[in-house]
């Protein structure tokens, strides 16, 4: 095992025999002036994923640690098992179905964090691979070298792709203390939960470099074609958002109002599809308070006219076109 590691890279995987080699090889091939290793959380795969990563461990014995499970415990439990093994100054993440395409990715991010001590989380840009069509979608690049994101911006909408991020371990340790004090209310946490907390405590940024490929497929929770599953995923983070605005001190009412309005705009159509009356009532009140009367009346009449969903989708498409032309 490499000594004096500067970075631990966490990889969570389950039943990814066809793609996990590309993921691991893209990490091992990183060119750095420091030592790093890979902690692979293998969550009881029923295919040959475990055998593949065991062979990769033989090939790269000083780079790979495997935390395996005899059954599928889920993403959260898998992540908890991995973070117990952390022993480096920085943490990077690459999900098992994504991969890195810039051999200098880690070096660029560590250089940034070493130079900018007031930043604790830095991501990069990524491009998206539609596995159904095998076509890539390129991201919008910045004019600047990096873009800083405020707590209000991150609270309103997650700008980070998990497989791009690097963050300081001490901030995770700080979060875990906060979590242990509040776990009766927070219950569990995933990536976006961490980014909100980190941005509350420190500065966060995204570098203007494309380093990662994110696979768009039905196996991604956020891309699940089953609307009820997608809503469960989004509702999880929405409930954690509500916990944060209640639990974190010194958040201004202006910030809370703006972030809550953004959440309502992002989620109300999915809530309509899933007929979540409790959440729809919350969003209805938010739209009325913000004098967004179009969305307010769309929700107000949705219980009487189910076809409101189509009107709402068309309205959101129109808003996107108008904003694009500005």
Image (cartoon, rainbow, N blue to C red):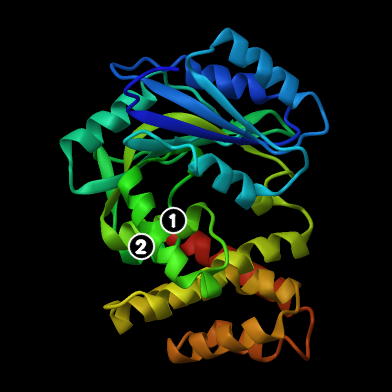
Mark 1 surroundings: few (<14), some (14-19) or many (≥20) residues within 10 A? some
Q: Considering only vertical position in the picture, is 102 above or below 12?
A: above
Where is residue 9 drawn, in percent x and y?
46, 31
Residue 153 numbered tag: 2
Q: Quadrant of the C terminus?
A: bottom left
Q: Quadrant of the N terminus?
A: top left
Please report the residue visible at 28 percent of the width from the left and 60 percent of the height from the top: 201
Mark 2 surroundings: few (<14), some (14-19) or many (≥20) residues within 10 A? some
Query: In the visual, does 151 lie left or right of 296?
Result: left
Q: Considering only vertical position in the picture, is 25 above or below 172?
A: above
Q: Considering only vertical position in the picture, is 151 above or below 308?
A: above
The CA distance from mark 1 to mark 2 is: 14 Å
Which corner quadrant of the image does residue 217 belong to?
top right
Query: In the visual, does 109 lie left or right of 287?
Result: left
Residue denoted by label 1: 194
Q: Helix, strand or loop at disc 2?
A: helix
Q: Earlier in the sequence, mark 1 or mark 2?
A: 2
Residue farthest to the top, as pictured: 59
Please report the residue visible at 38 percent of the width from the left and 26 percent of the height from the top: 105
Please report the residue visible at 37 percent of the width from the left and 14 percent of the height from the top: 31
Q: How many marks?
A: 2
Q: Helix, strand or loop at disc 1?
A: helix
Where is residue 311 drawn, in percent x and y?
69, 75
Marks 1/2 in contact by CB < 8 Å: the verdict is: no
Where is residue 21 drawn, in percent x and y?
64, 19
Whether residue 171 can be seen here: yes
């Amino acid at each position: 095992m490499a000594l004096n590691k500067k970075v631990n890279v966490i990889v969570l995987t389950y039943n990814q025999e066809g793609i996990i080699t590309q993921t691991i090889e893209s990490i091992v091939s990183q060119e750095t002036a420091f030592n790093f290793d890979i902690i692979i959380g293998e969550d009881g795969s029923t295919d040959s994923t475990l055998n593949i990563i065991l062979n990769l461990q033989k090939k790269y014995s000083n780079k790979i640690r495997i935390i395996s499970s005899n059954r599928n415990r889920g993403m959260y439990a898998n992540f908890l098992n991995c973070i117990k093994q952390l022993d480096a100054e920085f943490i990077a993440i690459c999900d098992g179905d994504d991969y890195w395409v810039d051999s200098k990715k880690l070096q660029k991010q560590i250089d940034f964090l070493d130079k900018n001590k007031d930043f604790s989380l830095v991501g990069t840009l990524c491009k998206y691979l539609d596995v159904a069509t095998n076509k890539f979608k390129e991201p919008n690049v910045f004019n600047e070298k990096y873009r800083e994101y405020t707590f209000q911006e991150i609270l309103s909408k997650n700008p980070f792709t998990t497989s791009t991020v690097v963050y300081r371990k001490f901030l995770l340790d700080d979060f875990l203390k906060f979590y242990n004090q509040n776990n009766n209310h927070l219950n569990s946490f995933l990536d976006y939960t961490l980014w909100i907390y980190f941005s509350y405590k420190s500065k966060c940024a995204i570098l203007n470099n494309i380093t990662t490929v994110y696979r768009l497929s039905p196996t991604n929770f956020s891309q699940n074609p089953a609307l009820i599953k997608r809503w469960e995923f989004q509702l999880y983070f929405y409930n954690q958002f509500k916990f944060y605005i209640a639990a974190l001190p010194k958040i201004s009412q202006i910030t809370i109002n703006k972030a809550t309005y953004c959440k309502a705009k992002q989620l109300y159509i999915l809530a309509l599809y899933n007929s979540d009356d409790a959440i729809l009532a919350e969003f209805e009140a938010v739209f009325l308070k913000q004098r967004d009367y179009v969305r307010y009346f769309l929700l107000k009449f949705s219980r009487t006219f189910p076809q409101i969903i189509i009107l709402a989708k068309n309205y959101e498409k129109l808003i996107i076109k108008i904003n694009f032309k500005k």
